[in-house]
Amino acid sequence: MNLIFLGPPGAGKGTIAKMVKERLGIAHISTGDLFRQQIKDQTPLGKQVESILASGGLVDDEITNEMVRARLKEPDVKNGFILDGYPRTIAQANKLDNFSRIDTVFNFIIDEEEVIRRVSGRRVCQSTGRIYHIEFNPPKVEGVDDETGERLVQREDDKEDTIRNRLEVYRQQTYPLIDYYEKRGILRNLEIETGSEKAADIIAGMFNRFEEA
Ligand code: ADP
């Protein structure tokens, strides 16, 4: 099954996608993670997008579409995928229609103050991509990754000013996608206050049922 996770930054898309990936055996494709990897490796693409990510703005549609189109050709995608953070504009959604077929779009609903609380407390391990929260999901030992012992960092774009900018970008550019997929009849709203595990159960449960039927 081919899924899209739609929702504002900090809604928990990445955390829940990692859980659903394990349960359904499908690929998790986060465009934010792909860009961050390019930046870490200092590739030409990485150098091109570095300042855009730091500011919280969006990378050019064509660059992003091309990166996703290539990623969807990789072998781990054969059983399906979760697109996390893509599409983020109507132009990207139109393009995606040309190279893939989407079954369900999950729209993560969360209030903005909660987003700011979550994102500003978020810490990540750069090598494993594991995500923590200083208050809601702290590592066993403060400031370091549970497995690798590496020092956790705050993403540059998780600082409060940048989060506010990302929320504004979300409202203007990404929010219209709710209507776009609603009209197609493939949108499912998901209130995620229930917690990440529960949300992952709901999503994975929907598809397990389909498979049994
Ligand atoms: P978030 O926590 O906002 O979901 P992501 O990790 O998905 O953040 O993305 C981080 C940044 O990467 C975005 O602020 C943007 O600059 C860039 N980015 C990610 N996905 C896209 C996309 N589909 N189109 C354009 N830019 C993107």
Image: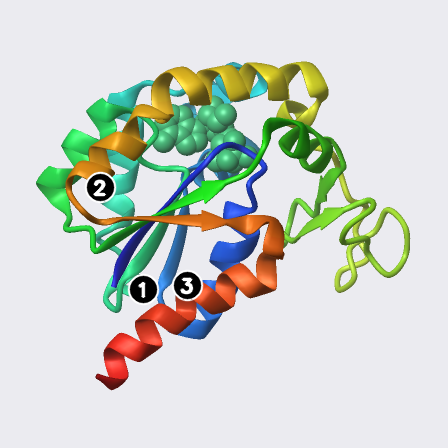
Tag 1 residue: 76
Element class at badge 2: helix
Residue type at tag 1: Asp
Q: Name the image quarter holding the C terminus.
A: bottom left
Inter-mark Cα distance, 3 to 1: 20 Å
- Which colour scheme appears in the figure? rainbow
Report the residue at 45% width, 17% height from top.
Answer: 169
Image coords of residue 167 (percent x, y): 53, 21
Along the viewing direction, whichever of 21 and 45 lies nearer the viewer: 21
* Mark 1 Cα shell of 10 Å, populated few (<14), some (14-19), many (≥20): some
Image coords of residue 177 (percent x, y): 29, 30
The numbered dot on residue 203 is 3
Q: Name the image quarter holding the N terminus.
A: bottom left
Element class at badge 1: helix
Q: From the viewer's perspective, tell me whether residue 7 is left or right of residue 188.
A: right
* Mark 3 Cα shell of 10 Å, populated few (<14), some (14-19), many (≥20): many
Report the residue at 39% width, 15% height from top.
Answer: 172
Q: Earlier in the sequence, mark 3 or mark 1?
A: 1
Inter-mark Cα distance, 1 to 2: 14 Å
Tag 2 residue: 69
The residue mark sitting in front, 2 or 3, is: 3
The residue mark sitting in front, 3 or 1, is: 3
Contact check, label 3 and label 1, Cβ < 8 Å: no
The numbered dot on residue 212 is none
Q: Give the answer, above or below, for where 170 lies relative to 81.
A: above
Q: Earlier in the sequence, mark 2 or mark 3?
A: 2
Q: Quadrant of residue 211?
A: bottom left
Query: Farthest bottom residue?
Result: 212
Residue type at tag 2: Arg
Q: Is residue 42 visible?
A: no
Along the viewing direction, whichever of 175 and 73 lies nearer the viewer: 175
Q: Earlier in the sequence, mark 1 or mark 2?
A: 2
